[in-house]
Image (cartoon, helix red, strand yellow):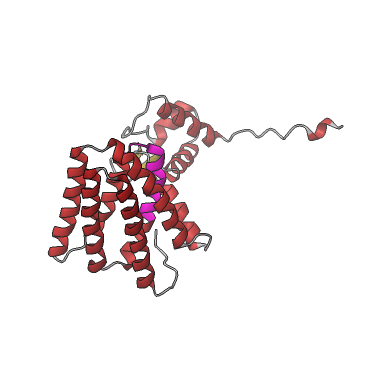
Amino acid sequence: MSNSKVFEPVRLKRTFELIIDLLREKIYNGELKIGDRLPSERDMAKMAEVSRNTVRQAYHILDVLGIVYINKGMNGGAIIREPSNRHLTQSLNDLMGLGKMRLEDIIEARILLEKDIIQLACLRISDADIEQLEENARTAQDLLQQGKSPHRQNLEYHLLLADIAKNPVIKMVYSSVVNLLSMIIETTADLEMAKIIADEHLELAALLRKRDLDQLLVFTEEHIQGSKERLIAKSDGKPILTKW
């Protein structure tokens, strides 16, 4: 057998990729922390003995990856950002836009994830957590009485649940799914739909206070399926697309 088939060509990393690897290593080992400002392009180029264009390219890719954000102006620069699920949400949105994923698929995933979250929350929730959920739902109801949309509060309610479950992996995936659904709901929901959601959130908090897992799981699926039916009714059966 010829040895020519055994080895792959060696690919050397480009200079800007080496800069990215260097900065990632410093972030992961704690030398650079969330909120820290990276050296200016000029200073980094001088320290790394590379061109400013190479540093600019590295910073741009780190921005696209969500590792830093770029501020413009006098006090601008690249700053280490808090990790987020933004790119996962965007990928899910793109799949929907390309017709590779349906609303029903997103809602099915949400039901499975939220049931897991509810089970964990039953084990880990505190009275203070329940009061925070209740306060969120009441704030949403107060906004509705003023004729205002509680969309942000209704989204935050589910993100609070994910925090209470205390599993960062489930939280990351679940938050992406909920964020995408929230974007869809924002384009279709009215105050009547928002009121149903806020009222059901208060009911869910009451069930969490009782730690009645069986009832919670049934209620959770009914809550999500109800939202699905209202969304489909609002869309008149047409695909619901979101703008990112």
Lateral position of residue 17 relative to residue 203, left or right: right
Report if residue 168 lies within the magenta region: yes
* Residue 70 in sight: no
Report which quarter residue 103 is drawn in.
bottom left
Q: Position of residue 21 (x, y in %)?
A: 50, 31
Q: Nearer the viewer, residue 37 or 44?
A: 37
Range of the magenta residues? Answer: 165-180
What is the residue that sits farthest to the right in this orientation?
1
Q: Position of residue 136 (x, y in %)?
A: 19, 50
The quadrant of the picture occupied by the C terminus is bottom left
Lateral position of residue 230 relative to residue 51, left or right: left
* Residue 107 in sight: yes
Q: Is residue 23 above or below residue 202?
A: above
What is the residue that sits farthest to the bottom in this orientation?
236
Residue at 22% in and 67% down: 191
Residue at 31% in and 54% down: 219
Q: Position of residue 238 (x, y in %)?
A: 44, 72
Residue at 42% in and 50% down: 112
